[in-house]
Image (cartoon, helix red, strand yellow):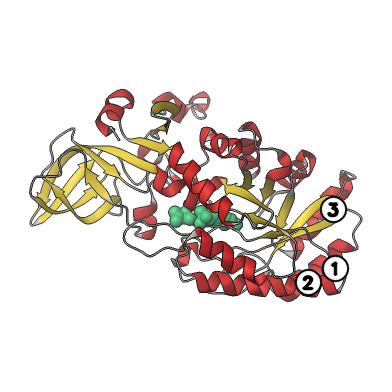
Amino acid sequence: MDFKALANKYNTPLYIYDLDYMSVQYEKLKSAFKAHSSIMAYAVKANSNLSVIKHFADLGSGADCVSIGEVRRAILAGVPPYKILFSGVGKKDDEIKEAIETDILYINVESEAELNRVEAIAKELNKRCRISIRVNPNIDPKTHPYISTGLHENKFGVEIATAKRMYIKSKNSDNLDPVGIHFHIGSQLTELKPIYEASEIVADMLRSLQAIDIELKFFDIGGGLGVQYDDETTITPYDYAQAILSTLKGLELTIICEPGRFLTANAGYFLTKVLYEKKNGEKRFVIVDGAMNDLLRPSLYNAYHKIEAVSKNDGEKSKADVVGPVCESGDFIAKDCFLPSLEHNDLVVVHSAGAYGFGMGSNYNTRARSAEVALKNGDDRLIRKRESFDDLIALEKEFLD
Ligand code: LLP
């Protein structure tokens, strides 16, 4: 990849996404489920750029959304409403209303109180709303605690017994149509066992619902498939699919999968420019123009991202922290990585930045967010302009007296 040319053309900091790589990942996962009817519903939160969503829509993907804003993005990008899901623990009334009016595939309901709201809103609209219930199987996914979601101590979903009550209520309601069952135990999963165990618990529950005449159509397995950031061993899509399908013996439901990171993480690069080097005692710092407001994962989760100096890989390397200009000690992109001596305007590329990168960015320190560029068939194309100072103050300016 010609990072130098991209930096010259679009400036830095810059997000770069290889759409061809995303297609390869999509096909890998989709084909792993080919023995079964399935819908891949791309988890928009991983990378919500409209052109990225459109790329997946063109491949046949649906969209898993967690706000009405994401639903609107998905629709704008060409995802048909019948492939859109709406998940999340705290949906507001107007979001539920719009989701029902948009006639999306279903709403993933996460509490009894929410089910009551969905029913009441559907009634007001004189409609039936398709729902799925998110079950919390109380399984430890063995991932970072901030991205673990399948334990009772996490805020997500409901216990089996509660879910059962909710299905019975929905079945007896004139305004609810229970069509699916959902679980998602966490993100960046690298062990198969917890996924298998969760799937087995949920499949057993399905059987017990069948026994009381509640027939569902969709088995929504969430997302979570991990990727390699460093040298971790990951689960293959084939093993993942086999583990889940093996729990569904005799059940003919459509699988809904909500992959985010697997499709996008390793398709993305964050390109940043060296401003200065300095030493505080023995400690070496490389100060770059990208920061925690652009890529929050290292600061928030202590996440590892591979770092490389562009076209400077033969010089002697020494240990350094790569840090941004934000006024926080927690503002770092990498710690204790080995880099050659760098000069003003040298480029540093951060790998695996396609998922939860730009989307978790902010304007902290009144820093404009980066531009985003897509690569496809050897061409590069701007898919989000770099923000300007005017963009940053647009919603405040009129109140200045
Ligand atoms: N479905 C549901 C219900 C989810 O909560 C998530 C992610 C996904 C699907 C997609 O998961 P994936 O396939 O991407 O693992 N910001 C964190 C990750 C948060 C994940 C939140 N939920 C990070 O940077 O690692």
Residue at the spot 44% in from the left edge and 30% down from the top edge: 392
Where residue 120 appears, as percent x and y from the top left, is 84, 53
Residue at the spot 53% in from the left edge and 40% down from the top edge: 48
Please tell me whether residue 29 is drawn above or below residue 290 in the rendered image. below
The answer to whether marks 1 and 2 mark residues whose Cβ atoms lie closer than 8 Å is yes
Disc 2 residue: CB within 8 Å of ligand 1? no
Left or right of 18? Residue 124 is: right
- The residue beneath circle 3 is 120
Q: Can residue 186 be seen in this view?
A: no
Disc 3 residue: CB within 8 Å of ligand 1? no
Where residue 106 appears, as percent x and y from the top left, is 74, 51
Amino acid type for the residue under numbered disc 2: Lys
Badge 3: residue crowd in 10 Å (few <14, some 14–19, many ≥20)? some
How far apart marks 3 and 1 lie (CA) works out to 16 Å
Q: Which of marks 2 and 3 is in front?
A: 2
Residue at the spot 91% in from the left edge and 63% down from the top edge: 172
Between 398 and 7, which is closer to the camera in this rendering? 7
Please tell me whether residue 183 is drawn above or below residue 299 in the rendered image. below
- The residue beneath circle 2 is 164
How far apart marks 1 and 2 lie (CA) works out to 6 Å
Name the mark on residue 168. 1
Left or right of 211? Residue 77 is: left
Q: Which of marks 3 and 1 is in front?
A: 1
Please tell me whether residue 189 is drawn above or below residue 54 in the rendered image. below
Between 69 and 223, which is closer to the camera in this rendering? 223
